Image (tube, grey):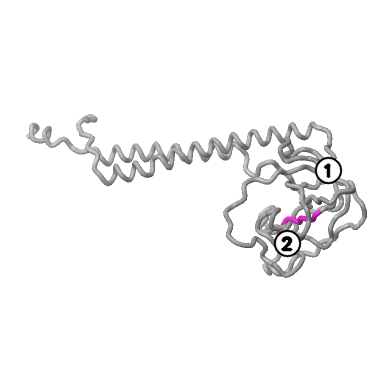
Amino acid sequence: MKIGKKTFKPSLIPTIVTLLILPILINLGFWQLDRAEEKRELIELFKQQNKLGPLLIKDTIKLGEKLNYRTAQVEGNYNLTKQIFIDNKIYQGKTGVHVMTPFKLKNSEYSILVNRGWVPMGIDRSALPEIKTPTNILKLSGKIKTLGKKPFMVGDQFQSNEGWPALMQWVNLTDIENKSGLKLLPYIFLLDEKEQSGYIRDWKPVVMQPEKSTSYAVQWFALALALVIIYIVVNLKEDKSELKDGE
């Protein structure tokens, strides 16, 4: 194929490299667009759930209902002996943990895991924060947070297996039930910012806004276009037959 005074003659190695990398760049672009759409839907769901009245959580509530970010209330008392810290949580550039405390529902054998917010953590991971927990019967306000897909991890997620409190990398309700002996509802309760028994709370449906994912998608597509242009330029050869005629 001739382009101006040059002929497009693709060689083997650039063609293989382009065929391998180009689909990856394009797929990454579409993946970021999907992520942006998911975030928009999650933000819209967050707004809609805020308009609904609080739902009193009981052990009869099933996970199949549309509960994510639903405003809710729980009545019962904290379990002071089964405190859990979720490690590697960042707030304003500082490393810390989320304080997770089981909350036993009134007149029920079930408990729900309450995320009471963020506290800072020192360099020594064995020195866990000292947490104050009320002992009286409480009626708490907050939001229900359904659990997403768990990351791939091998083995026990507890970093410390020597009693309580416990330090974990990820919320795994099955592991927590096995270690604690508690019966837990299959979601988390995000404690409302106005509640007194919590710490730093800034609950948002997404950490990164949809526009950021869209800009990443544009970057991936731009790289894909640049790769195609480079591939064409690299494989443009001088037409030797025209050079001979010119002589």
Q: At which x and y percent is residue 154?
A: 58, 60
- Magenta span: helix, strand or loop, mainly? strand
* Residue sitting nearer the eye, 29 or 183: 183
- Spatial separation of the CA atoms under disc 1 and disc 2: 23 Å
In the rendered structure, which amino acid carries the disc numbered 2? Answer: Lys
**Part of the protein shown in magenta:** 97-102
**Residue at numbered disc 2:** 179
Residue 21: which numbered mark, if any? none
Which image quarter: residue 47? top right
Compared to 88, does 214 lie above or below? above
Q: Earlier in the sequence, mark 1 or mark 2?
A: 1
Q: At which x and y percent is residue 213?
A: 56, 39
* Residue sitting nearer the eye, 185 or 141: 185
| Residue 11 relative to residue 22: left or right | left
* Element class at badge 2: helix
**Residue at numbered disc 1:** 58
| Residue 106 relative to residue 219: left or right | right
Q: At which x and y percent is residue 72?
A: 82, 40
Badge 2, how many Cα within 10 Å: few under 14, some, many 20+? some
In the rendered structure, which amino acid carries the disc numbered 1? Answer: Lys
* Residue sitting nearer the eye, 146 or 92: 146
